[in-house]
Image (cartoon, grey):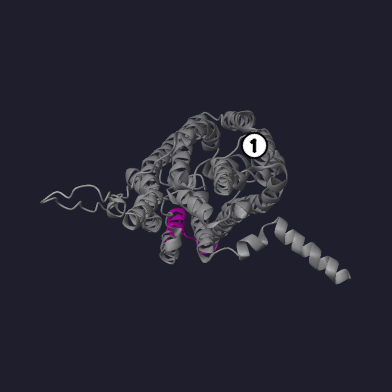
Amino acid sequence: MASTKVSSLLKRIAEEFGIFSILHSSRDTKLLCLQRFVRLFAYGASTLILVLYLSNLGSSDARIGLFMTLTLLGDVVISFLLTLVADGLGRRRILMLGAILMSASGVVFAMSGNFWVLVAASIFGVISPSGNEIGPFRAIEESTLAQLTPKEIRSDIFAWYTLLGTAGTALGTIMCGWLVQALLSHAHWAEIKAYRLIFCIYAVLGIMKLLLSLMLSEACEPEAPKREYEEVVQMEEVEVEAEGLLSDSDFEDPRRPTRVNEAPKPHLAAPLPKKIRKSIWPSISPQSRTTLLKLSLLFSIDSFASGLVPLSWLTYFFHLKFALPSGALGTLFFVTNILASLSGLLASSLAKRIGLLKTMVYTHLPSALFLALIPLPPPRHAALAILFLLLRSSLQSMDQAPRQAFIAAAVLPGERTAVMGLVNVVKTLSQSGGPVATGAMAGRGKWGVAFLVAGGLKAGYDLAMLGMFLGFRGREEEEEEKGKQRVVGRGESVHA
């Protein structure tokens, strides 16, 4: 009896956290999640030392901020073009191209110290200044996951997708932190040499991601759209068959005089449908455009706030103000990312009870408030600042999986890659203004202003999101209801 209760409890826990959903998912779904883990591992490792590397090369805080802004602006252009044509050219091809660029940028960072060469590598390659997603990967992967996953368990899959990414960032930061500290303390390497080893590892991880992309199947490509002319062709074929069975000769009037040299009537075949040429450019319906415009406006506010305090600036802030060494920084941000990973699973369970939108807002709002409190403790009270950072991290990722599931349901399936790509482009473009602003404030010793402004903007985004989309019904749900109504209507007409 007791074992039955324990088994039932474990089964219920597994269902709540989407364990069955990810275990029973397709091979492609697992490969996409594994790709995200590898990619975010590389981002976490490089982000921890990116600002320190540029600083050791002689770049000022203002110039470092400019570097981050130019990187994000370059990513906007690359991501915008690649995500727009991803469905037309092939999703797997774009993922492979991105992996090659990612590996190439790691090689350049490991070999060059020229500021503008590094800027070019970060723009045309893939270097994340924030530790978060950059490049076209996320939009393509999320659109593919939405296609491969039933709507009922989509939030579970997105939660695991988010968790594995955050776990990758966590492991990347702690590996990088302690590896660099060991090289500096025990092997007595120069700092620049140690940092360049991390970028060599980054290039190898890019190759691993390329291999994972090569393993994806044809199921990851966009589904063929339903052509309306197919029903028309079927109707025309029925009419042709009827014409053959009941031809003019069967109904010809016997009293009608036969004309000499009268040519027989030619048999007119039904016109063949014209072959529709596949376009590489996406099509977004007017209703989805309205939703896209609203989401882009709100996400731009949140992303600009995120750009003010990216992970690379956070690590630099704690290093300068509280004198934390590389190992301690790696451990600290390992813990923050682990907390974010675990909380992402709780978000999936919470979304099943209160809905996607409320989960997004109710978890993100207190996270914004904790963010604004981080710079307030003085240098001797580092523990209090770390506490605010941990509290913020335990909530900051809980809105990610519900948000992606919300976007996926808000538009039509054929629009997802383009819409998610455009949303990510808007977010990156808005985020690009943050680092240069923070760099200017950091140069004047005004770190606290950046945190306060970021927290206030994020709180405003949450309230606006709730006000604009409370009670919103997605296109996917509307299309399903219309389909059911059409089936019912046809059934009634047949019986009539």
Percent across and percent down for residue 305 are 55, 33
* Residue 389 in view, yes or no: no
Q: Among all residues in the image, which is located at the extreme left?
A: 261
Residue 309 falls within the magenta-colored stretch: no
Residue 190 falls within the magenta-colored stretch: yes
On the rendered image, what quadrant is the N terminus found in?
Answer: bottom right
Percent across and percent down for residue 386 are 68, 44
Picture residue at 80% right of the left edge, 68% below the top: 7
Picture residue at 65% right of the left edge, 54% below the top: 338
Q: Residues within 10 Å of mark 1 (few under 14, many from 20)?
A: many
Q: Secondary structure at mark 1?
A: helix
Percent across and percent down for residue 362 are 69, 37
The dominant secondary structure in magenta is helix
Picture residue at 40% right of the left edge, 38% below the top: 73
* Residue 176 in view, yes or no: yes
Span shown in magenta: 186-202
Q: Check disc 1 and give the amino acid type.
A: Leu
Percent across and percent down for residue 357 are 64, 39
Total label count?
1
On the rendered image, what quadrant is the C terminus found in?
Answer: top right
In terms of depth relative to the viewer, which is nearer, 491 or 397? 491
In terms of depth relative to the viewer, which is nearer, 161 or 288? 288
Position of residue 252 in the picture relative to residue 227 (left or right): left
Position of residue 339 in the picture relative to residue 158 (left or right): right
Determine which residue is flagged by label 1: 371
Position of residue 251 in the picture relative to residue 153 (left or right): left
In terms of depth relative to the viewer, which is nearer, 78 or 21? 21
